[in-house]
Image: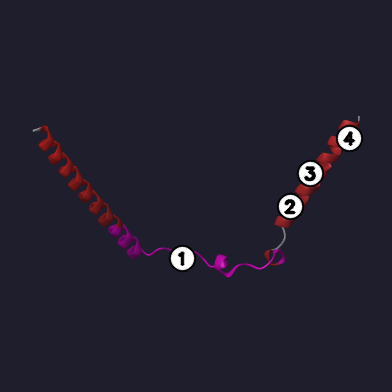
Amino acid sequence: MRARSTWYALFLYMALILDFFRSLLSLPLFWQGQIDVLSSRPLVKEDEVDRDKQHQSAEKQKSAKDSEKKGKKKKNLDRQALEAR
């Protein structure tokens, strides 16, 4: 009988804690503390021009890496061909 009452008391205690946190969520924002200025600013949408510039820059970097890899591959193939002779 004592174990059952202990579990019931624990259940009531957890329900009380849950109810406390629910009440905190329902409070108005100005009661919860100050709002950070940066977090209250609306999100700035990215311009298409900026997006295009970033895309072009990424393409240039990719093409530079690809050409570098092709150069290394060609050098390795030439070296292997010389070694095979």
Q: Which of the two discs, 3 and 2, labels the residue nearer the N terminus?
A: 3
Quarter of the image for the C terminus: give it: top left
Q: Are marks 1 and 3 in contact (CB under 8 Å)?
A: no
Q: 10 Å neighbourhood of mark 4: few (<14), some, or many (≥20)?
A: few
Residue 49 point in image, percent of width and height? 32, 65
Q: Is residue 45 above or below residue 74?
A: below
Residue 62 point in image, percent of width and height? 27, 52
Spatial CA distance of label 2 from label 4 is 25 Å
Q: Are marks 3 and 2 in contact (CB under 8 Å)?
A: no
What SS does tag 3 mark?
A: helix
Report the side of 25 relative to 70 (left or right). right
Spatial CA distance of label 3 from label 2 is 11 Å
Spatial CA distance of label 1 from label 3 is 42 Å
Q: 10 Å neighbourhood of mark 3: few (<14), some, or many (≥20)?
A: few
Q: 10 Å neighbourhood of mark 2: few (<14), some, or many (≥20)?
A: few
Q: Which of the two discs, 2 and 1, labels the residue nearer the N terminus?
A: 2
Q: Which of the two discs, 1 and 4, labels the residue nearer the N terminus?
A: 4
Return the residue at label 4: 5
Return the residue at label 3: 14
Q: Are marks 1 and 4 in contact (CB under 8 Å)?
A: no
Is residue 20 covered in magenta?
no
Is residue 41 covered in magenta?
yes
Q: Which residues are magenta?
A: 31-57
Residue type marked 4: Ser
Residue most toward the top? 1
Quarter of the image for the N terminus: give it: top right
Residue type marked 2: Phe
Q: Are marks 3 and 4 in contact (CB under 8 Å)?
A: no
Q: Which of the two discs, 2 and 4, labels the residue nearer the N terminus?
A: 4
Give the residue drawn at x 35%, y 61%.
Answer: 51
Return the residue at label 1: 44
Return the residue at label 2: 21
